[in-house]
Amino acid sequence: AFELFTTFGFPCDLTQVMAQERGMTVDVQGFEEEFEAFRQKSKESNNFTMGSDLQLFADQTNYLENELKVPKTDETCKYAWDSAKGEGSQWSSQLCAIWDGKHWLDTIDIKSGYGHKTVGLVLSVTPFYAEQGGQIFDVGTIVDPLTGARFDVQNTQKFGQYVLHIGTMDSAVDAAMKVGSDVRASVDYQRRALIAKNHTATHILNFALREVLGEKCDQRGSLVEPSRLRFDFAQNKPIANEQLKEIERICNQQIQKHLEVFANDVQLAKAKDIRGLRAVFGETYPDPVRVVSVGEEIDTLLKETQVDFGHEFSIEFCGGTHVGNSQEIFKFVITAEEGIAKGIRRIVAATGPQAAVEASIKTTDLMEELNSAKALKGEVLDHAIAQLRNKLNEEKEVSLTAKKDMLCLLDDLKTQQIKEEKKRAKEVQKQAAKIGEQLAESLENTDKKFLVTQCDELLADAKALQNAVDSIVKKLPELPVCVVSASSSKLAVLITVPKSMSKKVSAKEWLNVCLEACGGKGGGSPMKAQGQSQDPSKAAETVQAAKE
């Protein structure tokens, strides 16, 4: 069930149904454990670093070539693998050199202190892809079959004509690895399969951008990792949500067409004659150059030079590793779009069953919360809108287009709430005088020296507050009054002090105490002052401050 899902995107619940029809069962708990491990592996795959920034400079590459007589690394076998299954061969090679950043070594083992120290190995032949062209490096292992020594490759970089495999010895194996030894090199092909999905998807995205935004949206850079892809391109303004939807639609359409991916080395002059071919602005390409086409054979592109294939297929110069067929990508989901420099935008996206399922589940959950919020009213609704907005802004794995649609729905919900409150406020203004009279009547024949009350029925409407306070003062002209009112979106305070008491009690100073409690602004005179805050949740604290 796990292999069907991660490789072919076949849902576990359908596997359960089919298994049940045949009298079989699916280990659901085992599936969930494997899937969680798969998720963590894809995330942790991005955390590899170069350790001690191990590099080969000109002096070291010259030493390899001229002193040690090491031939350039043969890396042609890096393209020989099965992207659909995430499998590949273990390749025989020879260990040509060992570099620790300062010295060339003849041998490394645990006893000599290289159990945890980062070093670099140069092989005669390698299936490992060295980081370049925006694609992250391969990881894997190099094993000496005679001694059992194992080297964990955590990074692969290319310097001149040599590929450096950077990592550490497996401390659990007490054996040496020596220059001149025959070794076996194995790539983590499952990790590479995730990277390949994202890499081919960047080519399809480049094609879709050109279809939607026009020919001027040249590529300005990219990054391809196991868990995501990042694509930078020329564009002077943000992409509208409807355009993003169309870009996403075209990408998924190309994926669903099950297009075969072709790749061949072609003489640079001939390759440049292919109509519709895209290349990275400012990039220098080798001769011959590798041409990658999603959907059309390279020979056809070279023969039919009068046909512009660029509006049907993605065609690019690229030395990276790709899927064999677009259906392996399974799903393309845009998760972010932003400006990174003047005239340059960036799209971040994810691919594969994992990205599709997680994005779908999270989008569904958020939509359910949004639909539930529609039944709420007043302050509860306002709180729900604020929480949902924060969740949407923080969520990185939900489809960006779905996120923007939900934010628009939240805006509509908030706008409708404000309209309803304004309508209710007009009705309340008519009732405010009566509310004030009732408050005054409740205080008649009491010995209270002032009135501080919270009256949310007035909806924090300034006119309603004024009408209510006028009614109170009309019945109790010598009573200082402070009325606090909260709505779903704001808090209002209105204070009046009789002229006879204004020298002892200042309405303005009284208001300042209230505004300090709720973070609001306002002003007035010793006899009358009013203010507002955008935080209605502080109503109780404001009333308490007024009483004190």
Image (cartoon, helix red, strand yellow):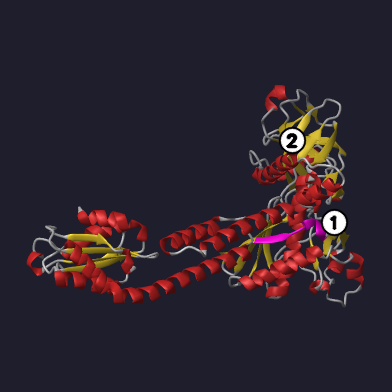
Q: How many marks?
A: 2
- Asked if marks 2 and 1 touch (Cβ < 8 Å), the reply is no
Q: Which residues are magenta?
A: 326-334
Whether residue 330 appears in this view of the structure is: yes
Using the image, determine if residue 491 lies above or below residue 6.
below
Instruction: List x then y, in percent, for residue 298.
Output: 89, 65
- Describe the element under mark 2 as helix, strand or loop: strand
Instruction: List x then y, in percent, for residue 328.
Output: 80, 56
Q: Nearer the viewer, residue 95 or 526?
A: 526
Residue that label 1 marks: 324
Which is more foreground, mark 2 or mark 1?
1
Instruction: List x then y, in percent, for residue 302.
Output: 90, 69
Q: Decide whether residue 538 is among the magenta residues.
A: no
Compare marks 2 and 1 and give the one earlier in the sequence.
2
- Describe the element under mark 1 as helix, strand or loop: loop
* Callout 1 crowding tier (Cα within 10 Å): few <14, some 14–19, many ≥20: many
- Name which residue type carries label 2: Asp
Instruction: List x then y, in percent, for residue 57.
Output: 70, 44
On screen, residue 145 versus residue 454, left or right, reads right
C-alpha distance separating marks 2 and 1: 28 Å
Q: Nearer the viewer, residue 219 or 545?
A: 545
- Work out which quarter of the rendered image holds the N terminus and state it: top right
On screen, residue 130 versus residue 267, left or right, reads left
Q: Nearer the viewer, residue 366 or 520?
A: 366
Residue that label 2 marks: 152
